[in-house]
Image (cartoon, grey):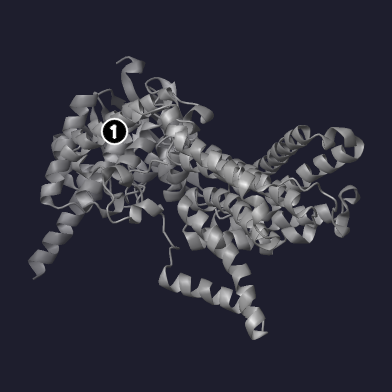
Amino acid sequence: MELSHKLLAIEKMQVKRSGLTRNLPWLVALAVVWTISGFATPLVNAYYFSIVIYVGINVVLAVSLNLVNGFTGQFSMGHAGFMAIGGYTSAFLTTSLRSFYPTLMSHPFAEQGIFIGALIIGALVASVAGYLVGLPSLRLKGDYLAIVTLGFGEIIRVFLLNIEAIGGARGMPGIPSLSSFGWVYTFALITVFVIARLTVTPIGREFLGVREDEIASEAMGVNTTQAKVRAFVIGAFFAGIGGGLFAHFLSYLNPSTFDFNKSFDIIIMVVLGGMGTITGSVIAACLLTVLREGLRSLQEITHIDFRMIIYSMILILMMILRPNGLFGTKEIWEFLPFRNFKQKKKSP
Amino acid sequence: MALNTLALKLDKLTIKFGGLKAVSDLSIQIPSGAIFGLIGPNGAGKTTVFNMITGVYKPSAGQILSFGRPIQGLKPYRVTQAGIARTFQNIRLFKDLSVLDNIKIAMDHNPSLPKIGFFSSVLQSKIYLGNEYNKEEKSVEFLEIFKLGHRARTVARNLPYGDQRRLEIARAMATNAKLLLLDEPAAGLNMQESRDLRETIRMIRERFSLTILLIEHDMRVVMEICDRIAVLDYGIKIAEGTPSEIQKHPLVIEAYLGRRAKDASKLASKT
């Protein structure tokens, strides 16, 4: 009895501490990102800089996939497909705008604005695709759903391969290089913010219910079809953002980038971090991205390409030692030894 | 009896699976506020009836009315939103979520609480937080009614069996149900837990002016708490009446209780 009253007291405190105060830490983080972007970016060498950017993009992709795979329990293997749609759409918009209205794109503010607009349009198109995949896939569970989404990813890739307007198999060169550190990490923050917050709302609780027991959820009044489609749409939206950031960093897109290996890379991050943990996905995305590059230096010393062998060994070991991923379904602060009641409560 | 005071009316409900008539021409009327028992041997079709009421199966023929409103053919979540909640024969909790979250998921669809939009939720506006606080308060209240308040943060899978059963009932009630369907709530409970359960069922009926339809094999539970009982055998209703009537009913004794008793006495006389 005592415990539950304590719990209510905490909740009451949180209601009072609402509005700007609750969102303030995130705004501070955003300010930090742009400060670093302003001062530190020119100081870092281009190679390390690219790793940092890929970390940010992978955070976006892993966290958004975790919403579908981890929180809603729908095993999707088509994340690269959504990423491709977002990437190609936004890249097509910015490149064609630049070639038709070169003066407009030469203005820095207009350029940034168009970039963000293109990213969001790309993400919206990706989420429409998410809706279309989500609908027929809803009758399917587990392995069957995985195969359908895998097939969907391949369809997207082959489709892109055959559109001449975006270069087909030659790829799409000359995409304006607009993904700055600031924007990549702004979107990484937004992704983490939205998805972390979502999981504690009624909408997010529906996702968890669907994961835990679909029949019981439905008996509790959850429209499970709607919940699953929502998860797919939101997941695809952020995958589209990730794709757009990727396209505008690399300045070149090729359909073969978005094959199922790319989907697997993201799945590995989610599984390694733990299905249903946002901090786990973030940390796994950082670790794996850095690891793949870090192993290159080993190659320089030994002159043998051990990279993929070591990478795979680490994954195998991880799965043996921690089968539920780094954090399982917990967030990082749930492991802290001095956690008290407040920290135990998920309050992202 | 006016139609709208009937919490549930099954009218010639029939379902066929291929050539098999699992339930045929079942008619039951449950007045508001009653505890109604549905019993019968294994495979008699009791759970099938539940599944038809809750929209998991679509009846082949017949009508289901709840408080005068036809509900047959509705999707399960719509049936729940119409005020009918259920528990399951094999407990179906959200096992990896906390006890409190189990209740909250049900509470999210309680029509008496407002729904908050996506952006308001994500940005945690004051309205959203206030609403969540109300929900939490109500959930904790619910848990305390069911003597689970001290377990609020426990992961559901770690609860003792009896508590899991109670949590399932609490969760069903949190959907704002007016009619509760309990599928073998006493299965697997020990004597003490079973006694607690009977108390709980009586208590929630009083407290929420609830109507309960109950499937149960534990005769002590059925005979003690039910106002009326219907007996199913091979999908056909063979008897209906008060507990004492049912206990004396020849068909029931033959189909269900008697045959076993005869076998038992035969066995006993042989040895």
Q: Image check: A247 left or right of A323?
A: right
Residue at coordinates 20% horizontally, 49% vertically from top-left? B162
Depth check, front residue: A193 or A211? A193
Q: Quadrant of the C terminus of chain B?
A: bottom left
Circle 1 sits in a helix, a strand or a loop, which is it? helix
Q: Position of residue A278 (x, y in %)?
A: 48, 50
Q: Position of residue B71 (x, y in %)?
A: 45, 28
Residue B254 visible from this viewpoint: no
Residue at coordinates 10% horizontally, 69% vertically from top-left? B270
Depth check, front residue: A243 or B152? A243
In the displayed structure, B54 sits above or below A68; it is above
**Residue most extreme to the top:** B2
Provide the residue designation for mark 1.
B139
In the displayed structure, A301 sits above or below A311; it is below
Q: Position of residue A214 (x, y in %)?
A: 45, 46
Amino acid beneath label 1: Ser
Q: Tag 1: Cα neighbours inside 10 Å, few (<14), some, or many (≥20)? A: many
Q: Position of residue A152 (x, y in %)?
A: 70, 54
**Across the whole image, how many numbered discs are drawn on residues?**
1
Residue A93 visible from this viewpoint: yes
Q: Chain of mark 1?
A: B
Image quarter of residue B199? top left
Q: Image check: A133 left or right of A175?
A: left
Residue at coordinates 19% horizontally, 46% vertically from top-left? B253
In the displayed structure, B221 sits above or below B61; it is below
Image quarter of residue B243? top left
